[in-house]
Image: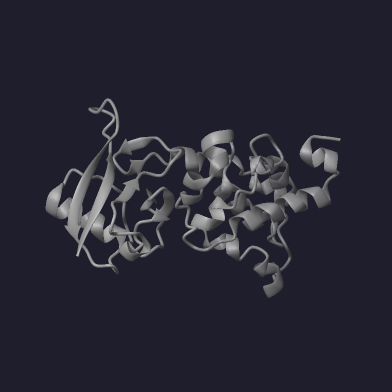
């Protein structure tokens, strides 16, 4: 069968404005969007640029906006979309475009780093006399957070980041903090919560649930953020947590 893709193109060094190129290829319903992009690059236009690596939903490198929704190109199939019409492929929203479908992820990783306590680990770590024991129940508190592959799909889908608060640390950053603040072995959980209480931290999230909707690992991201908010409220006076009396 034939499938048509409308693909975002932009080379900052030479193009004044972004534009779209349309490609029609032979594709099967069970083929991945990534397979189709490779066909376009191999058979029609070798200048088309996009990221890919493992191609199995593990590395998270091929995050794109497909028909206006963030997704991994290696996970989405042609049949997931109405292939009787053009399938629109664009870079992840919010990020600056390096070339075509490749975006600069530096702001994403800077936000991840910004929530890490700056206190030297030696000042917060007390060496135990024996190994740190953790029960399966304690581990289950942050199991979901460990699934995150840092693909940034949640950032490209978050209305807060794209429309309301560009300084928001973002869903993935808050999710990553949950991995530590709920770990019974962590010794700097309080300091991590203090960082999340700052402007552009956890309270900037408005619970649109878009991060949960697009997460390729099916992580309940919004639920994790709400749990973190609740932890701040229950462990600190309410006026201290929200900045209001």
Give the residue displayed 32% in from the left and 36% down from the top. Answer: 98
Give the residue displayed 39% in from the left and 39% down from the top. Answer: 104
Which image quarter holds the C terminus? top right
Q: How many marks?
A: 0
Q: Residue furthest bottom?
A: 136
Q: Does residue 43 appear left or right of residue 156 in this picture?
A: left
Classify residue 12 by image quadrant.
Answer: top left
Q: Residue furthest front?
A: 84
Q: Does residue 104 appear left or right of residue 14 in this picture?
A: right
Residue 147 position (above or below residue 159): below
Residue 135 seen from this side: no
Residue 146 seen from this side: yes
**Residue 3 on image: x %, y %:** 23, 58
Q: Residue furthest top?
A: 16
Q: Does residue 80 appear left or right of residue 16 in this picture?
A: right
**Residue 232 on image: x %, y %:** 77, 48
Residue 30 position (above or below residue 202): below
Classify residue 140 by image quadrant.
Answer: bottom right
Most foreground residue, 128 or 44: 44
**Residue 161 on image: x %, y %:** 54, 39
Most foreground residue, 136 or 149: 149
Give the residue displayed 39% in from the left and 35% down from the top. Answer: 96
Classify residue 93 by image quadrant.
Answer: top left
Which image quarter holds the N terminus? bottom left
Residue 14 position (above or below residue 91): above
**Residue 243 on image: x %, y %:** 79, 35
Q: How is the image coloured?
A: one colour
């Amino acid at each position: 069968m034939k499938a048509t893709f409308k693909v975002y193109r932009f080379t900052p060094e030479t193009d004044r404005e972004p534009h779209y190129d349309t490609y029609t290829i032979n594709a099967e319903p069970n083929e991945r969007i990534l397979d189709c992009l490779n066909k376009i690059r191999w058979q029609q236009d070798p200048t088309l640029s996009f990221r890919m690596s493992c191609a199995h939903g593990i590395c998270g490198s091929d995050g794109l906006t497909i028909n206006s929704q963030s997704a991994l190109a290696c996970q989405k199939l042609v049949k997931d979309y109405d292939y009787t019409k053009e399938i629109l492929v664009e870079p992840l929203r919010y990020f600056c475009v390096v070339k075509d479908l490749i975006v600069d992820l530096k702001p994403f990783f800077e936000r991840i780093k910004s929530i890490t306590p700056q206190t030297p680990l030696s000042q917060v770590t007390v060496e135990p006399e024996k190994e740190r024991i953790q029960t399966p129940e304690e581990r289950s508190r942050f199991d979901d957070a460990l699934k995150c592959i840092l693909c940034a799909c949640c950032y490209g889908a978050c209305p807060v980041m794209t429309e309301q608060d560009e300084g928001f640390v973002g869903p993935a950053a808050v999710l990553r903090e949950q991995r530590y603040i709920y770990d019974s072995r962590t010794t700097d959980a309080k300091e991590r919560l203090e960082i999340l209480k700052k402007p552009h931290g956890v309270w900037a999230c408005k619970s649109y649930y878009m991060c949960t909707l697009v997460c390729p690992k099916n992580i309940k991201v919004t639920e994790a953020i709400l749990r973190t908010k609740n932890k701040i409220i229950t462990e600190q006076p309410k006026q201290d947590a929200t900045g209001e009396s």
